[in-house]
Image (cartoon, helix red, strand yellow):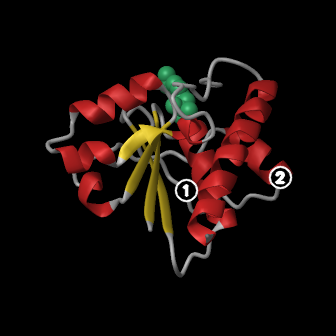
Amino acid sequence: MNILMVCLGNICRSPLAEGILRSKLNSQEHFVDSAGTSSFHEGERPDPRTLRTAKKKGIDMSAIVARPFKKEDFQKFDRIYAMDKSNLDHILSLTQSEQEKEKVSLLLSLNHPGEQPEVPDPYFGGDEGFEIVFKLLDEACETIAQGLKS
Ligand code: 4NP
């Protein structure tokens, strides 16, 4: 299974989601990546607060570099998870078929079906926002991992 995590900058939420989900899956069987709906931070390493939070939890982020979402991602990935509604709308606006649309959903709706919960953008806050984000992402990634094992 190829899974893509998407946020705005690809330096805070989606790289952390990528690292967390990778840590829960067998890399021989599954490929996990992340991207941003913007190219603001293209080529950059994750935000220092993201790296600090990941390190505290033992999550390896060494190979992650920001890149923008591209239309070819619809071919490469089986599932595309957006962190918030704005990211979701952006990705959906690029879809060209029902099949592409069906791949896209809000990450947190996995644990809250029927709702439209968002991973809050921690960029303009402090380290505590990243802890909250980590917990939300970890719960959702656990649900993905359990689903792929059964
Ligand atoms: P992310 O956070 O989308 O979780 O990576 C942000 C990173 C950068 C900006 C906004 C959100 N920015 O405005 O540059």
**Residue at x-position 46% and y-position 44%:** 81
**Residue at x-position 50% and y-position 52%:** 65
Write down the residue under mark 1.
64
Q: Which mark is residue 90?
A: none
Vertical placement of 39 versus 145: above or below? above
Q: Which mark is residue 57?
A: 2
Comparing 50 with 74, the one in front is: 74
Vertical placement of 129 versus 74: above or below? above
The mark nearer the N terminus, 1 or 2, is 2
Residue 70 in percent (x, y) is at 27, 47
Residue furthest to the top: 124
Q: Nearer the viewer, mark 1 or mark 2?
A: 2
Residue 74 in percent (x, y) is at 27, 53
Q: How many marks?
A: 2
For the question of whether residue 49 can be seen, the reply is: no
Quarter residue 77 falls in: bottom left
